[in-house]
Amino acid sequence: MTAPTPVTPPVTPDVLTIPRKQPDGGKRNLVGLPRDAMRAALIEMGTPEKQAKMRVGQIWAWIYERGVRDFDQMTNLSKAYRAELAETFEITIPEIVRKAESEDGTRKYLVRIAGGHEVETVYIPEEGRGTLCISSQVGCTLTCSFCHTGTQKLVRNLTAAEIVGQVMLARDDLGEWPEPGHHPKNETRLLSNIVLMGMGEPLYNFENVRDAMKIAMDPEGISLSRRRITLSTSGVVPEIARTAEEIGCLLAVSFHATTDEVRDRLVPINKRWNIEKLLEALRAYPKLSNSERITFEYVMLAGVNDSDEDAHRLIELIRGIPAKINLIPFNEWPGTEHKRSSNNRIRAFADIIYKAGYASPIRTPRGEDIMAACGQLKSDTERERKSRRQIEAETGAA
Ligand code: SAH
Ligand code: SF4
């Protein structure tokens, strides 16, 4: 491996994730364990191998289909077995410490995780569906110049339990665990979609994001279709193929610029994997059906990336990739140097793209009054900031 540049420090989940296995004496959390790991844990506890698969099925359904967190309520298990489970394991998800509700119905949860750190999770109700925007890291190693999270140092990766736990705590808050005998159907769900667009770069926490999304997709549990999960990356090229193979969810890419010179400044990971390398990885993404196009996210920054020439260049660049372009009006945050493009400019840009045959929806900012909109998330209580010098060095801003 070549030596990492400061743009993309060597973030490995093993270093930054708190251990999955509790130290001796502590109870191990069952939440976040993939089925095979749960099976191994039950066998280690003394469950006969022949029974282990069935026990996983039972416990899995209680936790992920019913939302049960107390072994005593698992009434299809014997009392003795329940007691044994309770002595060895726990079923724990992160805690909501504060909840804010926007005028438009958007809910922002401040979520406390082990170690006293906090991340934000946002629920966005829409006509006929509801999307949960979840975080994958506390802070971010990257320093995209327009992103509030980018001003906060990476504290650590979230565990798989903390990632799928955000889905579970939102279902708690929405009162959406089904009654016994009912299996959730997508059409009627308040929480019907997941976007990995909260704090952090999900592809720098690959294994935990994968395990958490596999759990969310499992048909015997939360049971969300892979087509209802979208992972957004700033462009961690080597992990893009793996995303298709190992998770199989939809992909969104934070594109945001049409020349390397501008993208180097806005999305500094571009210095490591430039536009050409990124597009190459996207072209190799398995052939997608029309409903499974790659989403190109494009934040509209006045005078920076929003000209007609940019729109034309964008069309040329993405030629041949099944794509839709999601234009995101920039959401301001305290201290930012950027300004949102005017509505007319955004519309003119969208028009050029639309006429070239691509869907070009303009994302309506949601929850702005509670600082819940895209790119505004940042833990209030997290004091560790990147220094201005570090941000300037990494974004190339003079
Ligand atoms: N780290 C991942 C996912 C989190 S950011 C990524 O960068 O893709 C989710 C989306 O919000 C990204 O497209 C990001 O570029 C965008 N975003 C960040 N800050 C923003 C802001 N202030 N206004 C609008 N969109 C923003
Ligand atoms: Fe990190 Fe994404 Fe924000 Fe860039 S846009 S700083 S990758 S969270």
Image (cartoon, grey):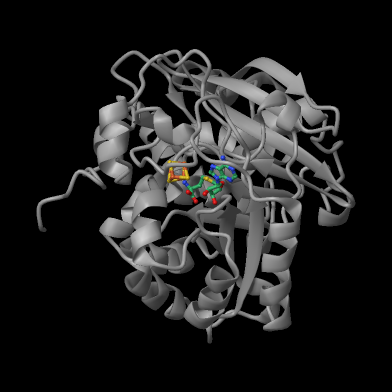
Q: Residue at x 67, y 67 (%)?
A: 349
Q: Name the spot of residue 378 as percent of width and height, x first.
A: 52, 26
At horizontal 33% and vertical 27% (from top left) the residue drawn is 18
From the viewer's side, name the closer residue of 192 and 352. Answer: 352
Quadrant hosting residue 144:
top left
Q: Quadrant of residue 173?
A: top right
Residue at the image point whose x is 31% and y is 40% from the top: 13
Q: How far from the left and from the top, in percent, is residue 50?
A: 47, 49
- In this rendered view, identify the residue nearer to me: 152 or 18: 152
Q: Is residue 114 above or below residue 202?
A: above
Q: Is residue 267 visible?
A: no
Q: Measured from the top left, where is residue 227 in percent x and y? A: 66, 64
Image quadrant occupied by the C terminus:
top left
Identify which residue, 274 or 57, lies in the foreground.
Answer: 274
Would you place residue 113 above or below residue 350 in this image?
above
Q: Give the residue at x 61% y 45%.
A: 330
Q: Is residue 348 above or below residue 209?
A: below
Q: Residue furthest bottom?
A: 320
- Ligand 2 falls in which quarter? top left
In this rendered view, identify the residue nearer to me: 205 or 29: 205
Residue 104 in view in this figure? yes
Task: Tell me: 88 left or right of 106.
Answer: left
> Vertically, is 291 above or below 40?
below
Q: Position of residue 290 (x, y in %)?
A: 68, 80
Question: Number of numbered discs present?
Answer: 0
Q: Residue furthest front?
A: 303
- Quadrant placement of the N terminus: bottom left
